[in-house]
Image: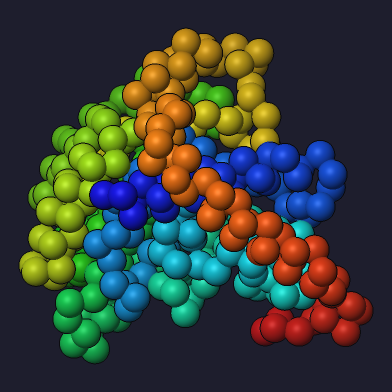
Amino acid sequence: MSSLFKQSLRIRMVEEKIIELYPSDLIQSPVHLSIGQEAVAVGVCAHLRREDWVFINYRGHAFYLAKGGPLPEFFAELMGKRAGISKGKAGSMHLAAPAHGIIGASAVVASTISHAVGAALAAKIKGEKERIFIANFGDGATEQGVFHESLNFAALHKVPVLFLCEDNGLAVHTSLKERQAYQMSSLVGAYEIPYYNLDEGYDLQSVYALAGEVIARVRHDQAPAFLRIQTARYREHVGPGEDFSAGYRSEQEISAWKARDPLCQSSSEMNKYRAEIESEIESALHFATEAPLPTHEDLLTDVL
């Protein structure tokens, strides 16, 4: 588990660096930070193979890094540089690194869920057994029509997709109880898709264990499953700050999560990795800051 802890700490430190840089205007992109949700991405991606695809959402930094997306190009992308993973044209909300199995995020809620189902169907038609596809989304996405259509299609055609819900209980500033009249388990059960739930999204070992079980089932059965993991975002919906003054949640709620979050506690293991991670981040930042900005000639490249 030490390597997974290191990965989680790396993601936390990368996003803390984004917070530090944001006031300088080096970051040329809105950011939806994953701070507080790292264990989900790390615990899930630890069981994935390079050929497995993850369809991330706009809060996708953690999954991008956990699946192997390169850090220098990540920072360059956020800075709008030509050396970015998408040549500076995608930014944080549309991250993609297909060579690493990270398929593009979208700012439109729930829009990549059907893409994951479609990719899984294509793999099934081509006989690409053992591959699986992850549709990663927040609890707010389950209120969209495409989510229900995707559950139905995946169940009907038995495609190898894992519906992974990172449930932080919020859709921007609106709590779950103000948005949903349904129980998630009953909804998923109506499509006869196996449903798994974990409330301790801060517990990396628990996430790793359950994710391994569910992913192995999807890979073996070549059929869908649903995994909901309760988690918490520590920062505002979009941006680097805290938003407790907005009144939709209390500081006590987040403090309760932080009290159980190993990344919020000082430990010898954390201290062991900090210097190495800091060095990697500084090297990546040097690459990104020295990289050239796009030119007028770049404006219409890669446009179909």
The quadrant holding residue 198 is top left
- Identify the image quadrant of residue 156: bottom left
Q: Position of residue 287 (x, y in %)?
A: 73, 69
| Point 81% across, 39% down: residue | 23
Left or right of 17? Residue 253 is left
Q: Residue furthest bottom?
A: 126
Residue at 52 percent of width and 46 percent of height = 274
**Residue nearest the viewer, comparing 18 with 119:** 18
Give the vertical position of 213 relative to 206 (above or below): below
Q: Report whether 286 appears left or right of 112.
A: right
- Out of 250 and 270, give the one closest to the viewer: 270
Q: Position of residue 282 (x, y in %)?
A: 68, 57
Residue 289 in view, yes or no: yes
Q: Is residue 193 visible?
A: no
Quarter occupied by the C terminus: bottom right
Residue 107 position within the rendered picture, expressed as x and y whole percent measured from the top left: 59, 53
The residue drawn where x is 69% and y is 71% is 84
**Lateral position of residue 55 relative to residue 35, left or right:** left
Eyeballing the image, is 127 above or below 39? below
